[in-house]
């Protein structure tokens, strides 16, 4: 039996990306090295479908790559190819008006793009059951 190839698209190298994406997947590969091979990428080749075809699972935090406008289309393509997409989110997609980035998020419709990614992904991982219940309104596979 060949190993399951997992592509982890970490959002950053030190914060959420390291703690929620990189470290758990390194542990997965360490504990189940006969079953899993994990690659971690910070700048995936968005338009190269041969790049994506080598993986059975793609795990991303909020978005695939830096371009929010390409993410949901790519998630849909991966799903159609039979690649399991797993979106991860740890914070609500629309912070309150008191948050310093609220205006930027609304102006650029980032909240709407994150929601579209959550809807498109095959599965979602998150932090708490309370947040999972909120996400289930968008995607039952939490």
Image (cartoon, rainbow, N blue to C red):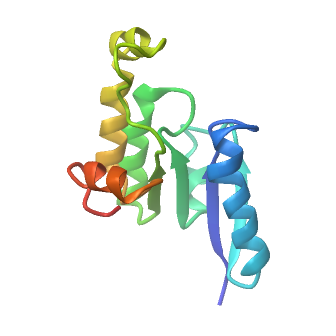
Quick one: 44 or 94, which is closer to the camera?
A: 94
Quadrant for the N terminus, please. Answer: bottom right
Counting from the top left corner in percent of width and height, residue 16 is at 63, 41
The image shows a total of numbered marks equal to 0
Quick one: 54 or 24, which is closer to the camera?
A: 24
In the rendered view, would you say 94 is above or below 102? Answer: below
Q: Is residue 106 left or right of residue 136?
A: right
Outermost residue to the bottom: 1
Outermost residue to the left: 137
The structure residue drawn at horizontal position 54% and vertical position 37%, both measured from the top left corner, is 47
Q: Is residue 1 left or right of residue 73?
A: right
Counting from the top left corner in percent of width and height, residue 44 is at 64, 40
Quadrant for the C terminus, please. Answer: bottom left
Counting from the top left corner in percent of width and height, residue 74 is at 43, 43
Quick one: 88 or 72, which is closer to the camera?
A: 88
The structure residue drawn at horizontal position 27% and vertical position 48%, both measured from the top left corner, is 134
Q: Is residue 6 left or right of residue 110?
A: right
In the rendered view, would you say 1 is above or below 133? Answer: below
Counting from the top left corner in percent of width and height, residue 66 is at 56, 28
The structure residue drawn at horizontal position 38% and vertical position 24%, both measured from the top left corner, is 95
The structure residue drawn at horizontal position 71% and vertical position 46%, both measured from the top left corner, is 18
């Amino acid at each position: 039996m060949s190993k399951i190839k997992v592509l982890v698209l970490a959002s950053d190298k030190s914060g959420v990306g390291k703690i929620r994406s990189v470290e758990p997947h390194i542990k997965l590969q360490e504990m189940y090295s006969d079953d899993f091979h994990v690659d971690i990428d910070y700048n995936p080749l968005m338009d190269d479908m041969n790049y994506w075809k080598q993986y059975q699972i793609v795990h991303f935090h909020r978005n695939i790559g830096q371009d929010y406008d390409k993410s949901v289309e790519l998630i849909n393509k991966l799903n159609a190819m039979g690649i399991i997409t797993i979106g991860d989110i740890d914070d609500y997609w629309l912070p309150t008006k008191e948050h310093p980035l609220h205006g930027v998020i609304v102006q650029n419709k980032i909240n709407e793009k994150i929601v579209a990614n959550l809807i498109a992904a095959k599965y979602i991982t998150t932090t708490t059951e309370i947040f999972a219940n909120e996400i289930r309104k968008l995607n039952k596979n939490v």
